[in-house]
Amino acid sequence: MIAENLARVRAQIAEAAARCGRCAEEVTLIAVSKTHGPEEVREAFAAGQVLFGENRVQEARAKAPLLPGELRWHLIGHLQSNKIRQALGVFERIQSVDTVELARDVNRVAGELGLFPKVFLEVNVAGEGSKFGFRPEALRAGMEELLSLDRVTVDGLMTIPPYASEPGDSRRYFAALRELRDGLAREFGAPLPELSMGMSGDFAVAVEEGATFVRVGTALFGERVGKTWKPS
């Protein structure tokens, strides 16, 4: 089933890209494997999926050693400062840098470890009080410092829009992130090539609005209800 789901999601990405004159190769699929066990991840890998997203550092650290070394991992959930050192040992990208202070801490720890991590800046485009992320105006105010960090490379923005029953309802938030990225790129002379936006219910709309990464879990692995994988 996972192989079939993967083929269907990839086809939907290609169709959405074609509708807006883009190439499917411009969009990278992240299989969101949180709460799913190594067997399911291994099945997705056997079907050709290499990049996986996890929300919790602890879960990824426990899961990754049980799986082929070719797998690549992105952190897509909130990162606590005391987990930075552990996260940098597992993830090739942190997509959830949501404050200037966290970026400074990542930069400091990366220096101690001799690493040069790439990160995305998480933006709370809707201004929801229940979610992490920069408000657009706060991001603009901190952008000069963020781009000046000597170990961290900021190469994109990420967002999680408000829940919507209809995929089209997310479009304005995806468009807002793209427009924010374009404005920051012009103002600060930074390319910021990546946009991580869109999940199982709305990834096709996100592709139409310029997503370069989409984060898909349920459409690949099924519902997470009752699933709480823990290492044995």
Image (spheres, rainbow, N blue to C red):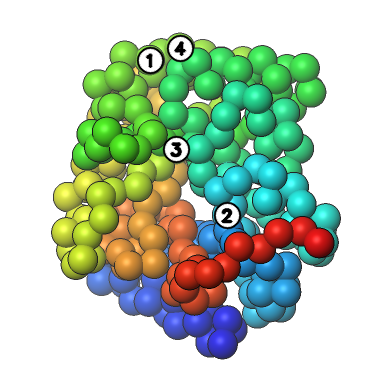
151 or 73, nearer to the observer? 73
Could you give the CA–CA distance between mark 3 and mark 4, rounded to whole angstroms? 15 Å
200 or 204, nearer to the observer? 200
Could you give the CA–CA distance between mark 4 and mark 2, rounded to whole angstroms? 27 Å
Question: Which quadrant would residue 135 be assigned to in this image?
Answer: top left
Which residue appears farthest toward the front when viewing the image? 226
In the displayed structure, would residue 229 be above or below residue 130?
A: below
Q: Earlier in the sequence, mark 3 or mark 1?
A: 1
Q: Which mark is residue 53?
A: 2
In the displayed structure, would residue 106 be above or below residue 91?
A: above
Could you give the CA–CA distance between mark 3 and mark 2, rounded to whole angstroms? 16 Å
SS of the residue at dot 4? Answer: helix
Q: Which mark is residue 156?
A: 3
Disc 1 marks which amino acid? Answer: Gly
Could you give the CA–CA distance between mark 2 and mark 1, rounded to whole angstroms? 27 Å
Say if mark 3 contacts mark 1, CB within 8 Å. Answer: no
Disc 4 marks which amino acid? Answer: Glu
According to the picture, the residue beneath numbered tag 4 turns out to be: 145
SS of the residue at dot 2? Answer: strand
Which residue is located at x 53 percent, y 21 percent?
103
Q: Which of labels 3 and 1 is toward the front?
A: 1
Would residue 93 be found to the left or right of residue 22 on screen?
Answer: right
Say if mark 4 contacts mark 2, CB within 8 Å. Answer: no
Q: Is residue 180 visible?
A: no
Would residue 77 be found to the left or right of residue 111 on screen?
Answer: left
According to the picture, the residue beneath numbered tag 1 turns out to be: 142
Q: Position of residue 212 (x, y in %)?
A: 43, 53
Q: Quadrant of the C terminus?
A: bottom right
Say if mark 2 contacts mark 1, CB within 8 Å. Answer: no
Disc 2 marks which amino acid? Answer: Gly
23 or 181, nearer to the observer? 181
Q: Earlier in the sequence, mark 3 or mark 4?
A: 4
